[in-house]
Every structure is written in C-alpha cells, then in structure tokens.
C-alpha cells in the first residue's frame, strides 16, 4: 500500500513533489547535471523513444522512470480523414524529450515541437493565430490547459483528460477515440452548411416577398415563414412542408 504524503505539489511543466517522513521526494524531468552524471543510463532509454523522469530524495537521484507513448491504432486513420477535410497543418506539441517526440511524430507523418513548457505552447498557438490561422487544440493534461484556453477551438479527451483540461475546453470527447475528432469536424461542417442554407433561403425569401409586395403582386397578409412551418429549421432539413 502506498503511504499517504504529508504535502503534495506540482512543479509546473516539470513534475511532482511530495513531503513524507520529513523527506522530499520528487519525480521530474532530468536537470542538466543529472543528464551529465547519468548519461549512460538516460541516453539508451531516450534513443528507444522513451521519456525519462528522475526520482529524487532530498535532491539526490535514487532512480529512473521511463515511459513511452504508444501509438493508438486509430490515430493514423483519423489524421488521414482530418487531412482530407482540408486541415492545413497538424503538429505535435509536447513536453516530452525530443527523441521520444520525433519517433512518434515520424510514425504519424506530422511535424512536432518537443520539450515545451506550458507558456511555450501558448506562444506557438498565438504565433499561428497572428498569421491568420484558426487553431484547433486537442489535449488532456494539466500542461495543455493554458494552450487549450488560448486556441480558437479546444477539444479535451474526456476519459483520460484532467479536470482542468476539460473545464478549459469548448468540446469534451466522451471516449478516448481519435476517430471522434474526424467525426467532429464532419459534423461541424454539415451543421455550418445547414446554417448557411437556412440564412440563404431566408434572405432570398424575404427579398422576393418584399419585392413582389412592393409591386402589388402579393396580398396584404402574405404569410410569414413561421406561420407556414412552426418548426422552420426542422422543416428545411426534413421537408415537412
């Protein structure tokens, strides 16, 4: 059983720290000094595409943790569908080590930027926005939340995502399935086509009605669209009237 800590805190963009039995235990990214002193242990793990974390007690390294992102089987198909919808650029933004990010990004055929702090992710989003791009951000972690808040459309992975990522996002996916993102883009585009169609039809209807009324071709009490079909939007989609 894991004992309960006295104090627990997050080191933003780096790791976590806890107080236990008057000792400070931390799990964080390797500092430059750690990389130099433990390079024989760290480098092979990084070359294997793993992100390495140092476990320290009172500032002294006592162990290593290595984690590797596994490519989800549906991600490649989802990204291909997103590209077919006309998305100009797909990029991986991560706080992981460059070698780990590069291995995953190359498999997916996308660009990447690695070893990023939360504020650096925000700046990248801002850079794209300053160039006139609409930025859609997909994230699930605490370090993603600031960039999600800055993006034009923020999407959180609902099952694995942290609470702050979900609260910051405009859209929360209820399954950790990347195909839902492609479906989301498709649904959004269909919705916009219907909205534009409704506006277009209403504009033409009003212009034609006013023009005919002005020349006396319509009776005084020409029915308005809502009297023809109370559920106007539903009527347009399903041709009820």
Image (cartoon, rainbow, N blue to C red):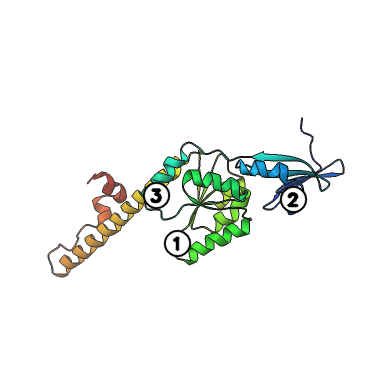
User: Is residue 181 or residue 232 the one in the foreground?
Assistant: 181
Q: Which residue is mark 2?
A: 36
Residue depicted at x 73% and y 40%: 64
Between disc 1 and disc 2, the foreground one is 2
Q: Which residue is mark 3?
A: 83
Q: Badge 3 local density, few (<14 within 10 Å), some, or many (20+)?
A: some
Q: Secondary structure at mark 1?
A: loop
Indicate the position of residue 95 as horizontal and vertical percent values: 62, 51
Mark closest to the chain's N terminus, 2 or 3? 2
Q: Badge 1 local density, few (<14 within 10 Å), some, or many (20+)?
A: some
Q: Badge 2 local density, few (<14 within 10 Å), some, or many (20+)?
A: few
> How many marks are shown on the rendered structure?
3
Q: CA distance from mark 1 to mark 2?
A: 41 Å
Indicate which disc residue 133 carries.
1
Residue depicted at x 67% and y 52%: 13
Residue depicted at x 25% and y 55%: 225
Q: Secondary structure at mark 2?
A: helix
Q: CA distance from mark 2 to mark 3?
A: 41 Å
Indicate the position of residue 5 as horizontal and vertical percent values: 79, 40
Residue 176 located left or right of residue 84 = right
Indicate which disc residue 16 carries.
none
Residue 141 located left or right of residue 71 = right
User: Is residue 154 or residue 86 the one in the foreground?
Assistant: 86
Find residue 215 and report its image quarter.
bottom left
Q: Secondary structure at mark 3?
A: helix
């Amino acid at each position: 059983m894991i004992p309960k800590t006295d104090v627990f805190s997050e080191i933003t963009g780096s790791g976590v720290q806890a107080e236990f039995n008057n000792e400070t235990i931390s799990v964080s990214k390797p500092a430059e000094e750690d990389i130099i002193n433990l390079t024989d242990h760290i480098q092979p793990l990084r070359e294997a595409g793993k992100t390495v974390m140092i476990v320290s007690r009172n500032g002294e390294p006592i162990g290593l943790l290595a984690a590797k992102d596994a490519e989800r089987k549906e991600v490649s198909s989802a990204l291909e569908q997103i590209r077919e919808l006309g998305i100009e650029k797909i990029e991986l933004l991560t706080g992981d080590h460059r070698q780990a990010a590069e291995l995953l990004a190359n498999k997916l055929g996308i660009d990447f930027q690695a070893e990023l702090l939360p504020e650096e992710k925000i700046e990248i989003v801002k850079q794209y926005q300053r160039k006139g791009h609409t930025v859609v951000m997909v994230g699930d972690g605490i370090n993603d939340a600031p960039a999600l808040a800055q993006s034009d459309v923020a999407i959180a992975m609902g099952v694995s995502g942290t609470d702050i990522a979900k609260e910051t996002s405009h859209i929360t996916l209820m399954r950790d399935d990347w195909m839902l993102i492609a479906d989301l883009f498709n649904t959004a585009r269909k919705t916009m086509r219907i909205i534009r169609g409704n506006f277009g039809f209403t504009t033409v209807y009003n212009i034609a009605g006013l023009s005919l009324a002005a020349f006396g071709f319509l009776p005084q009490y020409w029915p308005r669209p809502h009297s023809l079909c109370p559920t106007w939007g539903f009527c347009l989609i399903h041709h009820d009237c």
